[in-house]
Amino acid sequence: MKKELEKKYSHIDVESNKYDFWMDKQYFKADIDSKKPPYTILIPPPNVTGKLHLGHAWDSSIQDTLIRYKKLSGFDTLYLPGMDHAGIATQVKVEQRLKEQGISRFDLGREKFIDKVWEWKEEYAQTIRSQWKKLGLGLDYSREKFTYSPQLNELVNYVFVQMYNKGLIYKSKRIVNWDPIQKTAISNIEVIYKETKGGMYHFKYVLEQDSQKFLQVATTRPETMFGDVCVVVNPNDKRYTDFIGKNVINPVNGQAIPVIADEYVEIDFGTGAMKCTPAHDPNDFILGEKHNLEKVICMNPDGTLNELAGEFEGLDRFDARQKLIEKLTKQDLFIKKEEIEHQVGYSERSNAIVEPYLSEQWFVEMKGLANEVISLQNSDDKVDFYPKRFNDVLLKWMENINDWTISRQLWWGHQIPAWYHNQTGELYVNTTPPEDIENWTQDPDVLDTWFSSGLWPFATLDWSANNNSQLFNRYFPTSTLVTGYDIIFFWVARMIFQTLDFTGKKPFDDVLIHGLIRDAEGRKMSKSLGNGVDPMDVVEEFGADSLRYFLLTNSSPGQDLRYSEEKLRSSWNFINKIWNASRFVMMNLDEISDYSVVEKLISSVDKNSNTSDKWILNKLKETQKEYVQAIDKYEFTVAGKVLYNFIWDDYCSWYLELSKAELNGDNIESKNVTKAVLGFVLKEILIMLHPMMPFVTEEIYQQLELKESILLESFEIREFNFDVQGFETSVLETISKIREFRASQEIKNSQPLSFFINTQNSIHQNEFEINLSVINKFVKALTNSTLTNILVEGDVTSIKVADYFLEILNSEFIDFEKQLLDLENEKKTLEAEILRSEKMLSNQNFLAKADAAKVEQEKQKASDYKIQYDLVVEKIEKMKK
C-alpha cells in the first residue's frame, strides 16, 4: 500500500513533474458525452501584455480549487483557458518595443505593425501558459480561446451587425475620455484618477457694453477657453441679473459670447459664473445640447492647440496654459490662481492626463440592455453574487448607466465592420465587405476590448446563431465566475447584458467577487511604489501549494488581501507538517499490503478499536461536513481553518501521538485497526486538501500506491457516529492540563508525578477507567494515577478540568499560598455565576419569553455551578486546616 517519502519536504522536487503527468493523462479534458453533471469555469482571460501578477494567481487559485473539488465530487468539469488581445494595452507595449528600436508603427504601416503584435502575442501567450503550469491549473487546453482569433472575430462582427440592425449601435459626436498620447478614446476602466496638485484660475470676462463691469470666471483648464461659447449663471442669482442676455468678451480671443441662464449652475459654488465649453467638458456638452450651442473644438488629437488658439497654435496644452496666463496677466484680465488638489484622470496605459474631448465615435445604446439586466436580477433566475452586496453595486450602475463608447482609434483589435462609399459617403454595415470593395473604405477604428471580452461566456463555447454547438448546449450557462470587484462594471456587467441579448440566458450561475492584493502595509501594489511581487518568485521560494493556500485562506469573499511573507512561510510549515505526518503513517503501514484491507478494518472499528480510533473518525466526519459547507459557500478561509485545525491539532498533535500507545502494544488485532485508521484518515485528508494544494497531495497519494492519481478518487462524507462521549474532556483535556502544569512549574517529563482524578461524573469515570493507561503513557513518567470521588488530603494541587479536578501530589513544586488564592478567586467567580443564574431563573419575564430549551440550559448551568462551588469550598476548608 505504500512506498516511502523523502525525509525532507522539497517543494521544488514535489512540484517538478506533476503537471505534465496530469496533462498527459488528460484528467482535465471535459467529456462532452459524460453522464456526470457539468461544472464550468471560464478563466478570466489575462491580457497578452506580459506576465501574470498576484491578482491572476489569486483568481486562478480559487478557480482551480473549485474545479478540483467538483471533479472529486463527481462532476464533469470544464476549466476553459484563454487570453485577451487587450487592444490599447498590447499596442502600447509593442510600440514601446519598436521605439527602442527606433521604429514607429507609422513607419511599418497597419498590416506590418499588426504582424509585430501577433509575434508579441505568441511570445507572451507561451509565458502565460508556463505560469499556469507552475500554478497547477487544471485547464482543458483543447478548448483554449483567444479574443482576437478568426473564430472570435467572426462572432464579434456578427454581434456588431446584429446590434446595429436592432438600433442598439449608433455613431455620434460625444464627449469621450481621450488619450492624447495614444490619440484614441479610452474606456472608463482605463482612466486612473489620482489626487493631483493643480490650480483654479480666475479670469475677467468683461461686459461688451461696459468695460468697467465683468464676470469673474474660474477654470482648472484655461487652455480650453478658446472653445468657450457662452458664460452660464443661475437665473435666480441676483448678482448677475443684469448680465443675462448680454455679451461678455472671451479674454483669450476677444470674441463676444452671450451670458445665458440655467439652474445647473449653483449660486453658492465658486463665483456663480461658469464658462461653457461643450466640446471639452461632459457637463458643458449636456448644456450645449439643451441650449443648442455650438460645439467648438480648440485642440488637436495629440493635445496641442489648433488654429483657433492663434499665436498659441501648435503648443502643448500645458505649455499654452502658462503662456496664456502670462499674456492675460499683462492685459489685466487674469485675476488670481488658487492652489488646489483635485482628482485628475490619467490614462492607465500611457499615463497621459485624459482630455474630455468631442469626437465622433460608435456607441451602444444602453437603456434597454440595462433594463434586461435589472429584470434578470429581480427574477428567481438571477445571477447570484458572493458577497450579495455586489448585486446592489451592479444594479445601481445599471440604473444610472450612460451609453457605451465602443470605438478606439487603434490598429490592434477587431476592426469595425463598417465601410464608407468613397464618393457618396454612404455607410455600409455588414459581416462581409461590399462586393465592389474598391469603391469603399473600411472604418479604421477598432472595437473596445471589452466588447469582445463581453462575449466570452458564449463565444468560448462555440455559440452560433442557430445554437447547434454541443459544447454550448452542455456547459452553458457556466457555473462560477471568479473575478475582482474592480471590474464589475466593465466586464461582469457587459458579459451579463451581451449574453442575455444574444442567448436569452444568463452567462453564469454565480459570481464570486474577491478584492485586491495589497502589500503588508495595506497599499495597492504598483510599479511606482516598487512593492509589486512576482508570483513566480513566490513559487520558486515557497512553492505553488504554499502560495495557493495563502491566497485562498487569508481573505473573505469581497475583501482585500494583504501580502505577507510570514503567512507564506506558515503555509509552507503547514505543508511540511503534513509531509512529516505522512512519513510517520507510511512507516507504520508495512503490514497492510492492500487498501481493501484498510476498508475492511475500518468497518470493524466499533468492535475492535480503542476510543481514540473512534474519536478521530468522528472528527473526520465533522471536518468533512464543515469543509463542504464552507467550500459550497466559497468561504475558503473557513474551509482552510477547518482543515488546519483537524490536521494540525486533532490528527497530528493528538491522534498520531495517541496511536503510538497502540502501535507499541501487544494486541495485534487492535494494532492493525489503528494502522488502518491512520492510513484511511490520511487518504481522506489528502482528498480534502487536494483542491487547495494539488502538488504535495498528489505526491503523497501516489506514494500510498492506491489509484494512478488522486484525481481519480471520489470525495464523500463518511457517516461515522461512534459513541466517544466524554473522551475529549476526560482524556485529552487531562493530558493538556498535566502538560501545562509541567510547563508552568518547569517540571521535566522524566520527573515522576502522582495524581488523582477526582470526578463525580459517571461518563468521565467510565472514560478514565478505559483510558487511564493511555493517559499515563501519553504524558510520560506518571505514577500512582488513581480515580476517586473523594477530595484528597494533604499537600496537593487542584486543577479544575471541566467538571472534575486533577489532584497532584506536588507540594515541593507548588506555592501553597498561590494555590489557595487561585481557589479563592475560583470561588468568587462561581459565586457570581450562581447569583447570575438565580436572578435569571427567578425572573418571570425571562421564564415567560425564553424557549424551554434555553430555560433548561440555564437550570443545568446553575446545577453545575453549585457542584463546582461545593467542591471548591470543601477544598479551601481542608487547605486551611
Image: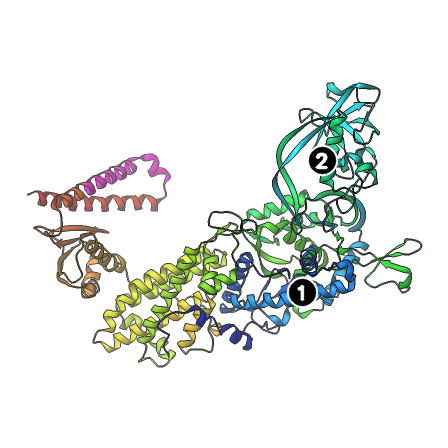
Q: Name the foreground residue: 253 vs 865.
A: 253
Q: Is residue 846 highlighted in magenta?
A: yes
Q: Tell me how far mark 2 sits from mark 1, CA to CA.
A: 41 Å
Res 481 visible: yes
Q: Name the foreground residue: 105 vs 812.
A: 105
Quadrant in the picture for the C terminus = top left
- Residue 869, horizontal then vertical, whole percent: 18, 44
**Mark drawn on residue 322:** 2
- 196 lies left or right of 519: right
Q: Amino acid at mark 1?
A: Trp
Quadrant in the picture for the N terminus = bottom left
Colour pattern = rainbow
Residue drawn where x is 78% and y is 64% of the image: 111
- 782 lies left or right of 132: left
Q: Amino acid at mark 2?
A: Gln
Establish if 831 lies above or below 386.
above
Question: Which residues fall within the magenta stretch?
Answer: 825-849
